Image (spheres, grey):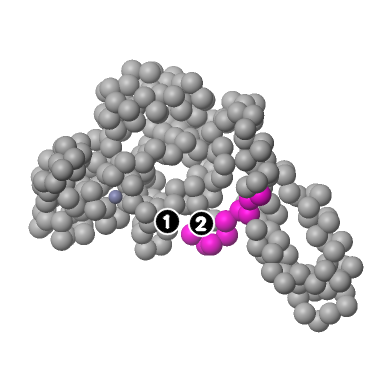
Amino acid sequence: MCMKRINLTSVAAGAWLLLLSCGQAGTGTEATNATVAPAAADSAQPVALPTPRREKVLTAEEQQALTPDQVIASLKEGNERFVRNDLTARDHSTMVRKAVLGQYPKAVVLSCLDSRIPVEDVFDKGIGDMFVARVAGNFVNEDILGSMEFGCKVSGAKLILVLAHESCGAVKAAIDNVKLGNITAMLTKIAPAVKLSAGFAGEKSSKNDAFVEQVAKANVTNTIETIRAKSPILKEMETKGEIRIIGAYYNLQTGEVIFL
Ligand SMILES: [Zn+2]
């Protein structure tokens, strides 16, 4: 919540606050953040207002009414708000209480473990909006596939988004063929993307950012193909148009998500 130095003695400001809390909070609409602060009637100082808050969690009816393309548009619009530092304010304590009744998320996002990617924030989403699976290198295995099937077939999500990112340490380790504990076995899941990038024209090393990006994007392609090959349930849902399975690439420097 973005409440900054509100002059509560101002009748005008108080009335405006009341209007906001009654008229806009809890509508569940997105991209409604107010950025204009009116001046108080009795002061030359502008009064900063709290941004309208989202208190509503998705319902079963709202989830069912969404199309996969609408979910993609929602994620793109959310990322645009993230990039311009205009995240929707959320009343988390209210949303926690409302979400206890059930969950009807619109998407499953498979992200890397990387701590620099706060997935819900990246898409300006909150409690109950998305399933988020995370593993270093954003690949799938039996457990992640089962989680995706739960998210889509059982819980009604309309989109699977495989989210890679710039300067991925797991991808670099796969390129370097690192051997260390359980990391060794984990990297075998990313190794196919290194092979797929064998035709790269240039230095094929983890020090070459362009090659690392090439492998990260090949890993997205390979992951999506693996989802289709190893999950008949998700492939059938995609064929019927019930879900879409797509990839994206997160730019660490700007926060922008490029949909592939
Ligand atoms: Zn990573």
Is 14 left, or right, of 81 in this rendering?
right
Secondary structure mostly seen in magenta is loop
Name the residue carrying label 1: 256
Residue 56, quarter of picture: top right
Instruction: Tell me: residue 33, above or below residue 221.
Output: below
Q: Which residue is drawn at 53% across and 34% down?
A: 106
Q: Label 1 vs label 2: CA separation? A: 8 Å
Q: Residue at x 16, y 37 (%)?
A: 185
Is 106 left, or right, of 169 in this rendering?
right
Is 199 left, or right, of 122 in this rendering?
left
Expressed as whole percent of the image width and height from the top left, the position of residue 206 reads 15, 56
Q: What element carries label 2?
A: helix
User: Mark 2 packing: few (<14 Cα in 10 Å), some, or many (20+)?
Assistant: many
Which label was assigned to residue 82? Answer: 2
Q: Given contact means CB atoms under 8 Å apart, are the residues at marks 1 and 2 in contact?
A: no
Instruction: Tell me: residue 25, above or below residue 39.
Output: above
| Three-letter amino acid code at the position of disc 1 | Glu
User: Mark 1 packing: few (<14 Cα in 10 Å), some, or many (20+)?
Assistant: some
Q: What stretch is highlighted in magenta?
A: 82-91
Expressed as whole percent of the image width and height from the top left, the position of residue 240 reads 44, 19
Q: Is residue 225 magenta?
A: no
Expressed as whole percent of the image width and height from the top left, the position of residue 8 reads 82, 69
Expressed as whole percent of the image width and height from the top left, the position of residue 122 reads 47, 52
Q: Which residue is drawn at 33% across and 46% down?
A: 112
Q: Which residue is drawn at 69% across and 64% down?
A: 3
Q: Which of marks 1 and 2 is nearer the N terminus?
A: 2
